[in-house]
Image (spheres, helix red, strand yellow):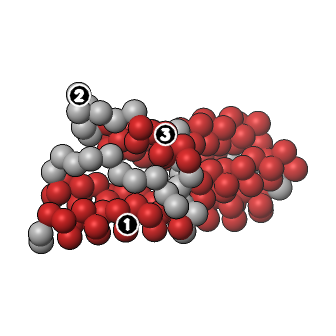
Amino acid sequence: MERSQLLRQINSMRQSLFDQGLLDEQFVQLEELQDDANPNFVEEVVTLCFRDSSRLILNLEQALKKSPLDFNQLDSYMQQFKGSISSIGARKVKDQCTLFREYCMAGSGEGCFRTFQRLKKEHTSLRKKFEAYFQLKRQAGPSQVASRPK
């Protein structure tokens, strides 16, 4: 694939992440921290975030199996998860975190279970989209900073 065509595809894919509401301004701020001295900064941060958040998902799954549910513990895990995922601008996942925490405050186990399933689905979907995005970026090689979302 020609480099200019690849760059258009990358920019289109990036824009679609914003258009779908998957990412917010925090991702743009993360991109602004990337420079020639660390050209893979964004990918590294996103990779670390997903590694950390996957560990927290396992903790949440274990905590959701306990009876009775410890809503304080669930809320604590979700607060950590939300902080991690917010650092990369994962808007839809972050929204599910907020909803989960509201269900914790209300003591709604059913709400927590339902929201957690949606959160895992959004998390997995975003991770796959990021994997495809960064694979294209690696194929294209070093390039200028991506344009801001419209």
Which image quarter is the N terminus in? bottom left
Q: Residue 13 bears which disc, if any? A: 1
Q: Residue 29 bears which disc, if any? A: 3
Residue located 77% across and 42% down the image = 71
Residue 74 picture location, percent across and down: 69, 42
What residue is shown with label 2?
37
Residue located 77% across and 62% down the image = 110
Which residue type carries mark 2?
Answer: Ala
Q: Residue 81 bears which disc, if any? A: none
Residue 106 picture location, percent across and down: 87, 50
Q: Is residue 125 visible?
A: no
Which residue type carries mark 1?
Answer: Met
Dot 2 and dot 3 residues touching (CB under 8 Å): no
* Circle 2 residues within 10 Å: few <14, some 14–19, many ≥20: few
Label 2 residue SS: loop
Which residue type carries mark 3?
Answer: Gln
- Residue 137 left/right relative to 128: left
Q: Give the farthest residue toward the left.
A: 2
Label 3 residue SS: helix
Mark 2 or mark 1, which has the lower sequence index? 1
Residue 32 picture location, percent across and down: 41, 38
Residue 7 picture location, percent across and down: 24, 62
Dot 1 and dot 3 residues touching (CB under 8 Å): no
Q: Nearer the viewer, residue 47 or 27?
A: 27
Residue located 53% across and 55% down the image = 23
- Residue 116 left/right relative to 49: right
Mark 2 or mark 3, which has the lower sequence index? 3
